[in-house]
Image: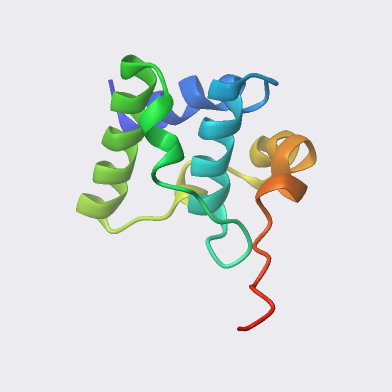
Amino acid sequence: MDTKQRIYQLLPIARGDTGGSSRVAQFLLSLWNGNRYRVDLQDLLYIDDDIFQDMVQVLNDLYQTNTQLDTYLNEGDIKPVIESWGNVYKFQPYEDD
């Protein structure tokens, strides 16, 4: 399975409203715009193995090819995830920062 297929398998999960959905959403949002959305790596440890493996492979593929998520997704693809989860995972600096 190629990178784009894996990403498009993850998208419907990220659009849902389960614990797994929130974890996939924060992963994709952080890859979409890491300055705006942050992922808690520890939280990703609590996801089904097959989904976790897809996420790790996507990350590895992006690293190996030196590409960004927007190479495979456009704003219309990620917009439903932003609408569902964006406020939850929007980066909020600590007051002391």
* Residue 79 as seen in the image, left or right of residue 94: right
Relative vertical location of residue 75 with respect to residue 20 in this rendering, above or below: below
Name of the residue lying farthest toward the left: 64
**Towards the viewer: 61 or 84:** 84
| Residue 46 screen position, x and y as percent | 41, 26
Would residue 6 be found to the left or right of residue 80 on screen?
left
Give the image location of residue 14, x and y in percent.
60, 28
Q: Quadrant of residue 51?
A: top left
Instruction: Reply above or below: 96 against 51.
Output: below
Residue farthest along the front direction in this orientation: 96
| Picture residue at 56% right of the left edge, 42% below the top | 26
Residue 1 or residue 33, whichever sits in front: 33
Q: Where 80 falls versus 68 (above or below)?
A: above
Judge whether 41 appears above or below 94 on screen: above
For the image, the number of numbered tags is 0
Q: Quadrant of the C terminus?
A: bottom right
Residue shown at the point (20%, 51%) measured from the top left: 64
**x then y, percent, for residue 35:** 57, 67
Colouring scheme, one of rainbow, by chain, secondary structure, one colour: rainbow
Give the quarter of the figure containing the N terminus: top left
* Left or right: 33, with 50 as reference point: right
Q: How far across and down, in percent of the image, does residue 71 sit?
A: 46, 49
Q: Residue at x 52, y 32 (%)?
A: 24
Residue ID at (32%, 44%): 59
